[in-house]
Image: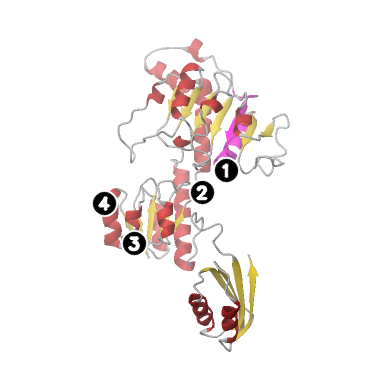
Amino acid sequence: MIVLVADQFESSGLDGLKLAGCEVIYDPQLGDEALVAALKHTQADVLVVRSTKVTAGMMDQGPLALIVRAGAGYNTIDVTAASARGIYVSNCPGRNAVAVAELAMGLLLSLDRRVPDAVADLRAGKWSKKEFSKAAGLKGRTLTLLGYGNIAREVAVRARAFGMHLSIWSRHLAGRAVDLAELGLDPGGAHDLDVRLAASPEDAVEGCDALSIHLALAPETRGLVNEALLSRLKKGAFVINTSRAEIVDQDALEAAARTRGLRVAVDVFRGEPEGGAGSFSDSLVKVPNVYGTPHIGASTEQAQEAIAAETVRIVGTFKDTGKVPNVVNLAIRTPATCRLIVRHRDRPGVLAHVFEQLRAAAINVQETENVIFAGAEAAVARINLDGRPSDAALALIGSGHPDVLSVQLVTI
């Protein structure tokens, strides 16, 4: 199996792929037309990327069967095009959660203590102890978490250790009764700290001291943090975004930072430069009470080693079993409307006979499995169909082959 790694990748991951029996081609500078040419030249079966964009045109250059995003998201990959071509898309969720959570907490502390400004003054020869002694502290303040996936859970644990109350909103938790253990929090921890599940984003941020955003980018979350939502924050509240730039209306955030004194720290920006270095200009970071970092949330050695190990596991599993861990583009529900259940002797040609009758009836198979009984003398095939075979077609399936024992049709 040929694996093309077209982004920066840990040497431990490259070694792991080779130990798994893969032919590894490593060129972290590939992108755009160069990547198109490389896929055509190498005839790679697997493509591993981090920030490199993967387009439909790239997928048409060879036998590509699997694209692995060595990171948590996959918004840089044309997943729709991959699905249309039967190419698996997989990622490495949760492996960088601690790294991003650590940055989020670092940004939160920096906003409270104005660490970057204090450092800047010292480097400029200014001793501003009186000014930078003005900090409220985090203990007893309320942190809102929008989204509650792997990263937010790690932030929650750390915020509780700092003595902060939590207000949590998640599409998956709204309206549910959830105990602390299910939230990944120690039930035996500080009992004087509130943990509240909010019914809506608006409810979650109402009057909070700090907001940390941990939502996946989706149509329903794009622009969710807008002017109306930001207006519910206290004046001078903190806003931290380490998720995706598109979730926040950046113009509204900049306006709130200028007019309502919101203190803002972001790790993600619209129009980020490609690659690890480049020129950058954004009016948001020119606001005095706004801090920024250049999309480094997942960039710790620990996180990258964990992501490399997970990438090796994904590729190795695919190579050895044909299955893909963490696949993101399989249908949750197919167009199947009924299931054909065929009990048969385990002999060559039985399933070919069944599929031939379905083809003749212009009925498409959506999913199928063939379960073998002990002794391998008999089996049951369960075949999901996008249409209902006629009685005549069912009769032909049942009577047209001597090794078909019974036929049953059920509605899904």
Residue identifier under label 4:
34
Q: Residue at x 55, y 28 (%)?
A: 229
Residue ranking furthest to the top: 130
Marks 3/2: CA–CA distance: 24 Å
| Of residues 71 and 379, the one drawn nearer to the viewer in this rendering | 379
Of the numbered discs 4 and 2, the one sitting upstream in the chain is 4
Label 2 close to label 1 by CB (< 8 Å): yes
Q: Is residue 165 left or right of residue 44?
A: right
Task: For label 1, count other residues whose C-alpha is less than 10 Å away and answer few (under 14), some (14-19) or many (20+).
Answer: some
Residue matched to label 1: 149
Boundaries of the magenta span: 138-161
In the rendered structure, which amino acid carries the disc numbered 2?
Pro
The location of residue 104, given as percent across then percent down, is 51, 33
Residue linked to disc 2:
93
Determine the CA span between mark 4 and mark 3.
14 Å
Give the labeled residue for mark 3.
44
The three-letter code of the residue at mark 4 reads Ala
* Circle 4 crowding by C-alpha within 10 Å: few under 14, some 14–19, many from 20: few
Q: Is residue 5 magenta?
A: no
Disc 4 element: helix
- Where disc 3 sits, the SS reads loop
Q: The residue under label 3 is which amino acid type? A: Ala
The quadrant in which the C terminus is found is bottom right
How far from the left and from the top, in percent, is residue 148? 59, 40
Residue 396 figure quarter: bottom right
Which residue is pictured at 48% across the width and 75% down the height? 359
**Rendered view: 265 above or below 6:** above
Using the rendered image of the protein, determine whether residue 190 is visible from the camera's viewpoint.
Answer: yes
Q: Is residue 165 above or below residue 30?
A: above
Which quarter of the rendered picture does the N terminus lie within?
bottom left
Please indicate whether residue 205 sits to the left or right of residue 241 in the image: right
Q: What element does badge 1 sit on?
A: loop
